Amino acid sequence: MDFERGIREADETDLRTDELVINMGPQHPSTHGVLRLVLRTDGEVVSEIVPHIGYLHRSAEKIGENLSPRQFLPYSDRLDYLAAMNMNLGWALTVEKLLGMEVSEKCRHLRTIVCELDRISSHLVAAGCYGLDLGSFTPFTWTFREREKILNLFEAICGARLTYSYITVGGVTADAPPGWLKQVEEFLDEFTPVIDELHAVLTSNSIFIQRTAGVGVLSPEKAVDYGCSGPVLRGSGVGWDMRRDGEPIYARMYEGYKFEVIASVNGSYPQDEKYPPVPVEAIVGDSWHRFYVRMLEVVQSMKIVRQAIEKYSQCGGDVGKPIALKMKLPKGESYLETEAPKGQMGFMIIGDGTPVPWRVRIRSSSFCHASVIPELCRGLLIADVPAIVGSLDVVLGEIDR
Amino acid sequence: MIMAEYLIPYISPWLAYLLVGLVQCGLLLTVVLLVAAVCNWLERKVSARIQDRLGPTRTGGRFGWLQSPADGIKLLTKEDLVPAAADRRLFLIAPYVSFAISLAVYLAIPWAGGNAFSADPQKAHDWTCVRLDAAVFFIMAVSGLEVFGVILGGYASGSKWSLYGAMREAAQVISYEIPLGLCVVIPVLIAGTMDLVQMGNQQSGWFWNWYLLHDPFTFATFWIYITCAVAHTNRAPFDLPEAESELVAGFLTEYSGFRWTIFFMAEYGAMFAISALAAILFLGGWNGPIPVAQILGLTWEHGAIAGYAGDVLGFCNLFAKASAGVIFMMWLRWTLPRLRIDQVMTTCLKYCLPLASIMLAGVLAWNFTLPGRMFFGISPGSPPRMEKQAETMDESSSEGVAVSLSRDPQERIANWQFQIANCKLND
């Protein structure tokens, strides 16, 4: 009798399912390069997720300790290869800070133009790939079509399309060719209507909202605790931008420019033009907000580029000259964080009187962002993992330095 | 099968039937393979247009029209890989299960009206491989089996991603079968028959005879049907079993070369079949929006040549409608992001299923309270061809197979009651 009841009870209550450990990456379509995530799942629900990094490690920091700062410059391209201009800038400014030198005003404005164009290009890749992560293929091609135009501009100014090494210690490698600024303006005019198209297929699409709103909510406190920065931090409603709040040597590049730091204040964004309203389902700090912040930042960058073109045209003088290849570095250290498209990019250099730095250290925002993944993905579905990783927009070249 | 009877005087019957069967199989296979090849090419071109690209332009001269055969050759020459962890036998057989089932659906799809209701049964024929009295039922039953191939493939691959894809497929397709079935029942209810040839012929004449415009409920049902059909064929935004960004390639992860191609042909075949079914159930089948064939006199009353010409026209009509359905699915795929699995299930169980049930109740109410009334109050009356069919069927058939063809609702209701009474007696 008892035996029978035991079997019956076991049949009724034994609904426990086994957990499955599943390996997402490093070869996986949506891990943005070679990020490897190990998921412990119960059915579709992710109970635990562990990111593994190191598949793209190239010892960039150690290489920096064996080369002079100018020789290391091409290596900085390979950190965040989607925003190489900003990487060049970070390194160049850090070394300039150590050397105590300052570039001409004209050079500053030219640097601003290329850096902001690069920011647009990086955000376009982020937006397109995010569509891809959510199963929408078309925005990807549209954003890459626009990015192509920016790459053409960069090719015209420095000859390279991905790893520019254009901004160098002491200035830029060459002044903009004649007619280049006009091409930039033409691009900006062409690009303006595309933003509305992207908003139509992504931001305001109801499936997109369903997939992203309320998914992966990162509270402002947690974002600060994890050291998040850039659009991830601003997506959580913290108005912090190195272009405005950074060190003078960097913030001077944006002095006198009119632009807004995009962050949700009391549930609304500073909108200069009409863009899709925040959906009711969205919570500040979720994937939707992170995406939206990037889309609005693109508009701000366009504004900055337009202003920079104007300021640049009014400046006389030269755009600076690269320092000597084997220039001796002074004793001392310098550390500088700049606002790269993905977040704050920090370079540190310690000179010991020789041309080769004694220590080079790189702080990347993507590393902090990747460390939030386990926090955000716990208890969600497998399909939410790409939705969250994509909204954090990590790039592995920067994580594995 | 009429063809076999022509041959019987000359050769032995079994050989005649075998020959005819082989010919029909060959024709069917050709049609499905051509459809799959054209769909593949179309998908490339449609997606290219949407994405501001050109797509294939040079393969085979202009428009890249030879792209599908070129792809086919490339895929055929690839190694037939079976993963070490796979259940070899099941892994190898799974694509064929899927493909055979996708092909089997085409058995019951009529491509044109023919003179299926001719007074002389000897001369009656239709454009169906096998004309079934319950063709709708057959198609629904068989197309639901397609899930087996996917589950088999996903399970046998020995990969966790494949297994996820297979489990998603099982959950999704089986759930969507219910609202899809309800949507299909609605035109069946109006037609009073499950024979697709009859259903198509009932919608002959102008476009307001289409079941889509029969009443507001059928109009709404059509859109529910489309939603469920997209989910049923695993097309985006419901392509969860092969969700690229989540499951690598879902159940297709371990497949390559020819077997992968077979899965894809099955998918395109199923897409086209479900669009053709939508065309017959809602969009008048082989009857165009304007009855060109009838106006021009291309009907069987004017001789065999005119009849065949009209049928070819009808075939083109059905083909165009089914292709439009396929292009619509492609348009969706290249525009929308993918839903999450819980949202897919919510869409099915919280929206599609209740809505389909409401539509079913609504159609029932509409047909019993406002009998025969067309959408927007247009009541075109019975087209001449319909009455003829109804008469012939009434004469030729025993009790109540075709009585439901009658356009007079009172008579129809009476017939139904009669049938129900008969059933009870038989019990």
Image: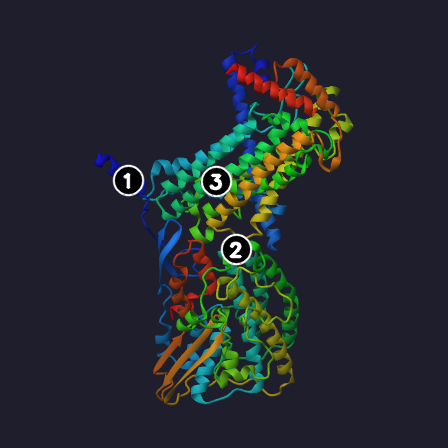
Chain of the residue that carries numbered disc 1 in the rendered image: A
Q: CA distance from mark 3 to mark 2?
A: 21 Å
The picture places residue B210, in percent across and down from the top left corner, at 68, 33
Disc 3, SS = helix
Circle 2 residues within 10 Å: few <14, some 14–19, many ≥20: some
The picture places residue B384, in percent across and down from the top left corner, at 75, 23
Same chain check for tags 3 and 2:
no
Circle 1 residues within 10 Å: few <14, some 14–19, many ≥20: few
Asked whether B425 or B152 is in front, the reply is B425
Chain of the residue that carries numbered disc 2 in the rendered image: A
Q: Quadrant of residue A111?
A: bottom right
From the image, state whether disc 1 or disc 2 is nearer to you.
1
Question: Mark 1 vs mark 2: which is more N-terminal?
Answer: 1
The picture places residue A48, in percent across and down from the top left corner, at 35, 58
Q: CA distance from mark 1 to mark 2?
A: 40 Å
Chain of the residue that carries numbered disc 3 in the rendered image: B
Above or below B28: residue A344: below
Which residue appears at 48% of the width and 34% of the height?
A: B144
From the image, tell me which residue sits under label 1. A9
From the image, tell me which residue sits under label 3. B175
Q: Quadrant of the C terminus of chain A?
A: bottom left
